[in-house]
Image: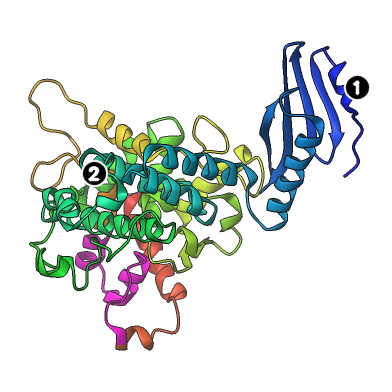
Amino acid sequence: MAGKLTALGARALVTPGRYTDGGGLHLHVRAADRRAWVFRYTRDGKTRDMGLGPFPEVTLAKARELADIARSKLREGLDPLSVQAQAAIERRAEAGGHTFRAAAEAYIAAQRDGWRNPKHQAQWSSTLDNHAYPAIGDMPVKDVDVEAVLRVLKPIWTKTPETASRLRGRIEQVLDAAKARGWRTGENPARWKGVLSGLLPPRGRIAAVEHQPSLPWQRIGAFMAALRDVEGVSAQALALLILTAARTGEVLDATWREFDLEAAVWTVPAARMKAKRLHRVPLSAPALELLRRLLPLRSGPAALLFPGQKADRPLSDMALTMLVRRMNKTEGDAPPPWRDIGGRAIVPHGFRSTFRVWAGEQTRYPREVVETALAHVNRDKVEAAYARTDLLERRRPLMEEWGAWCMRP
């Protein structure tokens, strides 16, 4: 496309500032010897700057060509910065001999745009950082075999089976993608059926995992009273988590557009749910009261309920963990004030168990109503086939009773 700048005119620009060529292409001048091309675009409501290289090393004609390529990526529904980052990762992989780490980074870069929840990418990176990279990160991806995969999985397979199972699946996906890129050949050594199924016990045969420490339901009112004395966004997020019996990520990534305060319903999109199914949460009177107190802080319908230090980033789950730890701080060897029946200090995720036990011991609501409130997947295929509703109206009184119980002194 024709622009406003000329090759000679661009060379004469030495005064600091941004000089537009049109269509998002700018020459950013910081000083006479510090000039660079920048392509500015908007995606998902956010303005982003993509560096195209220094001037005059990258000529005006070349910068226009690169800007055209970036625009074509936008038309294809791709993020030019993500495409640029993926290309850089692949170049590093080529130079480094295609290690498993490079293959994993290339896979994550390729999938990033499809992961609506930033936490999903963080979880991917975290499991690989903690478990896979120390053992096989620097190994050529073509050499990763069954023995190497077992070296990663065996230490955690029976200790934390859910994490181990997810890790196995992620390694399998990385190796499949590496094969598609031509970086390895042969069968995938991380595949379960026919490969690892004969070398590791199935998850169903592993002894039950120790549950998260949870507060006895009899003490939830006292805990909520103590929580109301704590200031800050973390305390408000934890209160909503408790009142809705939701998962930590569902609460922390929630945006205002998901809430209908008139209908008293919170609709969590399928992309943010563990089971990848839309989930509606009936909001009790205490939950609505909490949300209405937060309304004056709302910056827009797409805004996060509980932003972190940056407005476009959610509060971290560690913030809730640290809040509970502070509430449990004691002097000397005194036991934590907020503990489970075994004396262990509670954790935020344990409040779902508190709700479940309370519902089982204190109410007569059917099991399917309680399980639906927790957004648990029905493992019975026949029973699930007949479940044509999410039981929203049957769950309303359950959540109202829970809210009232939580607010008892």
Query: Magenta stretch containing residue 380, yes or no?
Result: yes
Name the secondary structure under disc 1. helix
Q: Quadrant of the C terminus?
A: top left
Q: Quadrant of the N terminus?
A: top right
Decide: is 388 above or below 390: below
Q: Amino acid at mark 2?
A: Ile
Relative placement, left or right, of 262 versus 205 is right
Residue 271: assigned label: none
Q: Label 2: which residue? A: 136
Relative placement, left or right, of 155 versus 382 is left
Decide: is 22 above or below 170: above
Is 210 in front, or is 119? 119
Q: Label 1: which residue? A: 9
Part of the protein shown in magenta: 355-381
Name the secondary structure under disc 2. helix
Query: Magenta stretch containing residue 352, yes or no?
Result: no
Q: Residues within 10 Å of mark 1 (few under 14, many from 20)?
A: few
Q: Position of residue 396 (x, y in %)?
A: 43, 68
| Contact between labelled residues 2 and 1, with CB atoms less than 8 Å apart | no
Question: Is residue 165 in view from this perspective?
Answer: yes
Is 230 in front, or is 276? 276
Q: Amino acid at mark 1?
A: Gly
Q: Quadrant of residue 295?
A: top right
Sooner in the amino-acid sequence: mark 1 or mark 2:
1
Q: Position of residue 316 (x, y in %)?
A: 41, 38
Q: Position of residue 40 (x, y in %)?
A: 73, 36
Q: Residues within 10 Å of mark 2 (few under 14, many from 20)?
A: many
